Image (cartoon, rainbow, N blue to C red):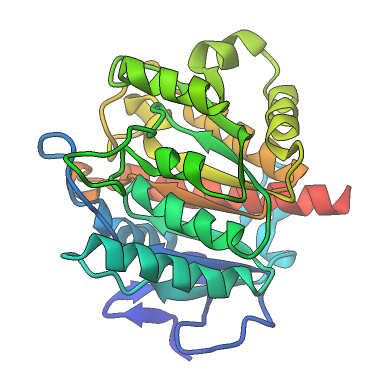
Amino acid sequence: MTNYLYGNTPTFLGAKNLSNQDSLDDVDAVVYGVPWEGAVTWGDYTGCELGPKVMRLTSGRYSGYLPELDHIDVFEHVKLGDVGDVDVVPADVEETMERITNFSSKLWQSGKFLIGLGGDHGITFPIVRALAEQGKKVGIIHLDAHYDNLPSHNGDQYARCSPFARLYEQEGVRNESIIHTGIHGPRNLPEAGRNARDAGAVTVTINDIRNHEDLPQLAKELHEMASKDVDAVYLSICSDVLDFAFNPGGPVDGNGLTSFELVTLVHEICKQGVIGMDFVEVYPQQDNNQNSAHFVSTVILYALAGRIVGQQG
């Protein structure tokens, strides 16, 4: 079976092409794309629906070998499958949210580790909703510069600035186990911090991270908070948790994480155990060299390596 999902687009990191198969039995982790962009909230920062395609294209450069992590070769331990993309409807937000939930619900039923490639951050709500609707009590580690918890954007309740407002309301998500991590910068609004506090969610700012000085221990503490009184922990990563120096294909947010800090946190969090993850808000049209899309491969490999080490430990 060809490793091209459509056109010139290969599977992510050379994964097995499962886009035309019903069974996920022979893989351990599943990649899927959500090529969705809803309401544009600022200027010309648009085009993140191209993220899944460009993340896949750039992933062709990489193996699973990480010499800096005790020479682990991820693909000696993990069989990766790629099921293609959710069939979104660009003109219909409600229908697309339902389709994302239905698509991811079938994947959650497999019990595999799920990796969603966005798309804007609005996709996280229907993905986690699908998990919660299967009877799982869910905690979330949310790595982002912004809370993304405003009630709506111009009436759109599913905009990229609102997924956590919807998740606060979702039965099956424990608000006290939502950990907004890496929050920083004046593109947050005052009501966003108040919304998090009022919902009972936890805020860990960029200064909290920098002042901790022990990233592996911090990752354990984040996971302990997210896993309290829940069945599963989900990891959601927005590209702009990174400083824009490390994220040319993302929103221009300064004072963010370095690439080292992000991959270290992701690796250590996944060692503790997460059920799935997403990576959102990569804007290929803003990034001539596609550096941000390239870096997603490294983040995902660090996450998978963390799961391997955690399972072996």
Residue 148, given in percent of the width and then of the height, sits at: 37, 34
Which residue is rendered at x = 31% and y = 55% of the image? 51
Residue 312, given in percent of the width and then of the height, sits at: 86, 53
Residue 210, given in percent of the width and then of the height, sits at: 57, 12
Looking at the rendered structure, the number of numbered marks drawn on it comes to 0
**216 or 171, nearer to the observer:** 171
Which residue is rendered at x = 31% and y = 43% of the image? 160
State the residue lying farthest toward the left: 43
**201 or 255, nearer to the observer:** 201
Which residue is rendered at x = 73% and y = 45% of the image? 230
Left or right, 205 with reference to 239 = right
Q: Is residue 197 above or below residue 124?
A: above
Q: Is residue 112 visible?
A: yes
Q: Is residue 68 visible?
A: no
Left or right, 45 with reference to 263 = left
Q: Is residue 238 above or below residue 243?
A: below
Q: Is residue 266 above or below residue 298?
A: above
Choose top left, top right, bottom left or bottom right for residue 146: top left
Residue 55, given in percent of the width and then of the height, sits at: 37, 57
State the residue lying farthest toward the top: 211
Choose top left, top right, bottom left or bottom right for residue 263: top right
**229 or 86, nearer to the observer:** 229
